[in-house]
Amino acid sequence: MNDEKLYGLTALFDSPDKIVLATRAVVKEGYKAFDIYSPYPVHGVDRGMRLKQSRIGLVTLIFGLMGVALALLLTWWTNSVNYPLIIGGKPFWALPAYIPVTFELSVLFGAVFTILGLLVIFFGFPQNVHPLHGTDFMKRVSSDRFGICIEAVDPKFDSKRTADFLQTLGSEKIEPIYYSLLESPGVGTILNRKFLLSLLFVAAVSSGLTYLTLNKLLFLHPWISLAEQIKVLPESRSTFYVDGFAMRQPVQGTVARGHMPYAFVGNMKGAEKFMINPLTPTKQVMELGRRDFNAYCSPCHGYFGDGDSRLQGQFPNPPSLHSDALRQASDGHFFHVITEGFRNVMPSYDQQIPEEERWAIIWYIRALQRAKHAKETDVP
Amino acid sequence: MIYSPGRIVDYTQPPPLVEGKSIATLIDESIAVQIDRRPSKKYLAALLVTLTMVLIGSIAVGYTFVYGIGMWGNNVPVGWAFDITNFVFWIGIGHAGTLISAILFLFRQQWRTGIARFAEAMTIFAVICAGLFPIIHLGRPWFAAYIFPYPNQHGIWVNFNSPLIWDVFAVSTYFTVSLIFWYIGLMPDFGTLRERTTNAVKKVVYSILSLGWRFSTRHWQHYEKTYVILAGLATPLVLSVHSVVSFDFAVSVIPGWHTTIFPPYFVAGAIFSGMAMVLAVLIIVRKVFDLEYLITMDHMDKMAKVILATSMMVTYAYLMEPFMAWYSGKSTEWYVVMNRAFGYYAIAFWVMIVCNVFLPQLFWFRKIRRSIPALFIISVLVNVGMWLERYVIIVTSLSRDYLPSSWGVYSPTIFDVGILIGSFGLFFTLILLFSKSLPVISISEIKSIVKGAQPSYRMGEDHE
């Protein structure tokens, strides 16, 4: 008995009338730290206890309004700021269409937070270490009796006098409730070995399941059935065609969309004679030419077309673009060389540089050539 | 005072809500004994049947997921068929539970006490069944998360103008609120069970579930207030949920769907079918678990009256639909009406009319309202009718829209039927598990309405 403290005195009653009268008497006697226990709410007891009206409705109001505000903010920010979309000619912020979501969120927030507030703030739950749990008193008031518990912390409490007082109320059974100090909340709960082991177990299971899901499960059917399809993929083998290739050559003479075949394949003379630069040397064209020249041509030809390669002799240096022969060569010559390459040394740039940009490069080469051989008349 | 046909009954007095026994311990025992007793052979046989149905459904769903929704009869004009029909049907079943637990609570209809817990459980199970269907309908259900507005790597957001998004919010809110409403009601009962049980494992489980509830009046006071608030929140919620479900149809422009009567029509239909389902299941449960004195004939009588009232609301909608189609003067609308009644799906339409309009009219007769076999048969047929109603609305409208060139006909495959069977199996499995593991009647609420449970008039009220 030494390590146990008195929690309070309990008294059981067998009818709702008796509990209401007893409640009034307890209040009249001046007790403050007491509570009435009943298997269901008995009308009139709360009034007899002089309890103030419950303020739980305030929680509902605040969080319900918060749900409204959050829903309006969410719909406004997502559908008209972050990802605006015109839907059915409505304005970006179409309030009537957002009413259902706003209503649902206000109900959701109101309900969930009312319950959380009730359980956690108003009741202090979960609390399974209360001294009354598991007592005979609790067993009876959870079933068919009505009980009073006057707690020992009440200043008017005196085990002898209070017991006598409860006796006068017509109680059928009076019983003191003791509790062990070890039972009181907050004693050695966090560092308990069982608790830590169970935490470890939960961590191991949840991380293991996460690993399996993300690394194994998601790579099984049907999660990958979009990736595995019965169709011909590039570079795949075919048992149907004699040559074993799944890919087929296009029909002879097929022209790619948006692509004009080069008219002077292997015919430099023709290109020199018949091709004319279609662009005019505007500022944009010169800028484009400079960008492409620096990107594609300058590694070998140098930034100014002097043939001073940056390749440090790993590849034969090309001739300078400023030779007399090249200064007099037609635009068609340059175009042909860029398109088809030159003497097995310069490769074809047909695939890399679009036709229009090739012409822009040629304008830029012309500008470089003129800059190297500037005359006095060129100075304005 | 026990009511039975043929006895002279004093109708000036309200009938007793709990017949015969009224002592609190007996209530505890009769409710808790179902949980403590080992399952009987009959119960296991029933579970075997429902689990077999779940298995059939699982196989059908498995085929759907592996081979795609091409396993179903859905085609291009009829993109919604069994799946969405089942979704609307199951959501509707859930609505009666909230009606009983929240709306009748606000109207102080004390007779609801005996059936509220069960009806709420049915709400939750029905919403679980309903929620599965849109996800199954995706074909690739793991993409269901995309419907929620969360910041994602695609940099896009859901479209809040879409009724389908409203649906997601409505149904998930409905499920959450129903669940916590149910749990809050269960908490005191878990406390009772915790104090009753002698089994150490059960003691731990009930302790955790009861959160340490200790029947204190200081708690009851907040608890009762919260219960009223939640009922107040759940009432507009339940009306909004089926209204939003009906927006899925009414907001579109398909003939036969684009009508403003849909929201009230759907809500009335939902309560109609849900009440019939509650009635059918309770008839079995009260028999199997010997709860005839807690779920009395008066409960059955009152539920039959609710079914009758909602049946007439649905009938009004059935009359209003052709009237508005005719009055609008639109040939497409009128064509849909004629096609429903005399077209390819005429049988479904007329079965629906018989089950939903004519059969419930029998509830005008007191004898039929108090005859268990009649109640059971009619309530099952009402559910058949209400399932067909959703089928008729969805399939006939989609199969015949504006362009004759895009008309088509839907007929279900074995996989459609399998998934439907599976959803019924899941529903009844959950009901069976619930009725064997949790108190099927709210112990604390039923105690508060037995005779002598509340203080006599002068005791409770101090008129100062």
Image (spheres, rainbow, N blue to C red):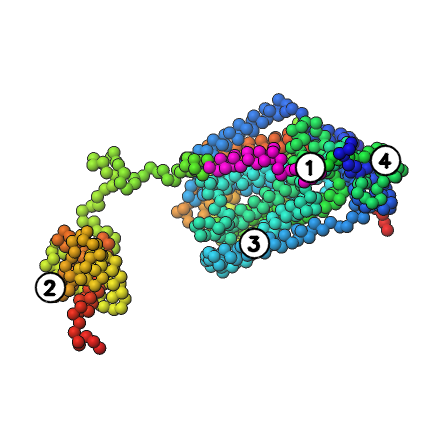
Task: Indicate yes or no whether the magenta region holds residue A185.
Answer: yes
User: Most extreme residue toward the top, as rendered?
Assistant: B41
What is the magenta range?
Answer: A182-211
Badge 4 sits on which subunit? A
Earlier-in-chain disc, 1 versus 3: 3
Give residue A171's mark. Answer: 4
Kind of element beneath mark 4: loop
Kind of element beneath mark 3: helix
Q: Name the residue beneath numbered marker 2.
A: A325
Earlier-in-chain disc, 2 versus 3: 3
Kind of element beneath mark 2: helix
Kind of element beneath mark 1: loop
* CB-based contact (under 8 Å), mark 1 and mark 3: no
Earlier-in-chain disc, 4 versus 3: 3
Identify which residue is drawn at 20% across, 46% down.
A251
- In the rendered image, the vertical position of residue B220 relative to residue A322, given as above or below: above
Identity of the amino acid at label 2? Answer: Ala
